[in-house]
């Protein structure tokens, strides 16, 4: 669905994105993870043909982005970082207007509104919407023309746990329909849960690219931490693959003196720290 080869781009004279190469397959959820200012939104803007002064090649759905024509957008749905609705119009009026810009018939507006629980509020002005409602509306705007590629920039940012869960389920449902999804986020839990592969981006460069599982497993073994009482509480951690030879643990188990025991794997954030020396949070 996407082939990026030797991509370079700059806003000023200083190169920002340099020599980036990667590809995304059809039906994949592909995540861009990185701290603020890393270049995630810039990269998305290149992929949707908003920034065309790049060097190298960026092909989306078989089309070189800088040579895009209007029809390019028939197959791309974008949920931008910020709300892009007309505040004085109602949700339904907004959706009807944006749908009229496409050739394709797309999905029924009522079905989309129901899908995100906005059917009761469809005839309210967007200026009366809460942040979470705007987020959900923005998301279905991206689905209006039933595109093959969805670009979602921070889709769960600022949502409460219920709305965030709903959004994640909706994203997974789109993948089940065969859509390709580009997801930009700072949220590593979301990335680990949703993405088939993630690219770590720092300073306009990809520092690592793999599935969340492989990234987590490739670095740092899981550890086991156990505690016991002996003139105060003691706690020790050891690698999970070495517990069979941990005499102290064996003794504590035999004497039934363990207070607690738990295992923990590195998180995507630990891996990000390991590779880039920076945190995502
Ligand atoms: N239109 C622009 N002109 C000049 N510089 C820009 C422009 N847009 C973005 N930048 C700069 O490019 C860099 C990357 O910005 P970008 O929006 O891609 O970051 P991001 O990774 O999406 O960050 P965030 O997580 O905060 O959304 C920043 O240093 C930003 O100031
Ligand atoms: Mg951004």
Image: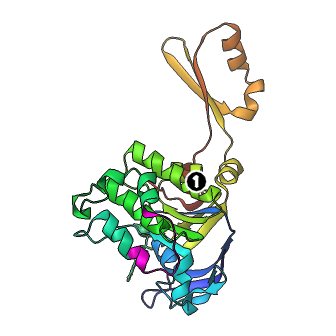
Q: Is residue 167 above or below residue 144?
A: above
User: Where, quadrant-wise, is the N terminus in this rendering?
Assistant: bottom right
Left or right side of 138 for 278: right
Between 1 and 192, the residue placed more toward the observer is: 1
Residue ranking furthest to the right:
245
Between 211 and 117, the residue placed more toward the observer is: 117
> Disc 1 marks which residue?
173
> Does residue 84 appear in the picture of this structure?
no
Left or right side of 6 for 153: left
Q: Quadrant of residue 22?
A: bottom right
Element at badge 1? helix
Q: Is residue 79 above or below residue 7?
A: above
Q: Residue at x 46, y 68 (%)?
A: 142
Residue 81 x %, y %: 39, 67
Residue 180 x %, y %: 62, 66
Q: Residue at x 60, y 44 (%)?
A: 266
Q: Is residue 100 above or below residue 251?
A: below
Q: Which residues are magenta?
A: 98-109
Q: Residue at x 44, y 62 (%)?
A: 140
Q: How many marks?
A: 1
Left or right side of 151 for 252: right
Q: Is residue 100 magenta?
A: yes
């Amino acid at each position: 669905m996407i082939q990026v080869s030797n991509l370079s781009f700059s806003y000023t004279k200083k190169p920002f994105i340099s020599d980036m190469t990667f590809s995304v397959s059809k039906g994949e959820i592909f995540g861009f993870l990185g701290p603020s200012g890393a270049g995630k939104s810039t990269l998305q803007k290149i992929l949707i043909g908003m920034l065309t002064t790049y060097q190298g090649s960026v092909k989306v759905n078989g089309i070189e982005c800088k040579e895009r024509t209007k029809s390019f957008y028939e197959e791309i749905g974008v949920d931008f970082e910020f709300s892009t609705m007309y505040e004085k119009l109602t949700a339904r009026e907004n959706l009807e207007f944006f749908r009229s810009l496409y050739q394709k018939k797309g999905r029924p507006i009522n079905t989309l509104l129901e899908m995100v629980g906005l059917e009761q509020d469809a005839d309210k002005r967007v200026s009366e919407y809460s942040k979470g409602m705007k987020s959900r509306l923005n998301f279905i705007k991206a689905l209006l023309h039933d595109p093959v590629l969805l670009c979602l920039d921070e889709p769960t940012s600022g949502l409460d746990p219920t709305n965030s869960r709903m959004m994640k389920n909706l994203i997974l449902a789109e993948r089940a329909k065969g859509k390709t999804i580009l997801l930009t986020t700072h949220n590593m839990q979301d990335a680990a849960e949703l993405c088939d592969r993630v690219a770590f981006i720092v300073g306009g460069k990809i520092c690592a690219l793999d599935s969340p599982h492989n990234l987590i497993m490739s670095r740092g073994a899981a550890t086991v931490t156990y505690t016991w009482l002996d003139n105060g509480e003691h706690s020790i951690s050891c690698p999970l693959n070495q517990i069979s030879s941990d005499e102290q643990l064996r003794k504590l188990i035999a004497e039934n003196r363990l207070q607690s025991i738990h295992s923990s794997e590195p998180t995507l954030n630990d891996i990000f720290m390991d590779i880039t020396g920076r945190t995502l949070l």
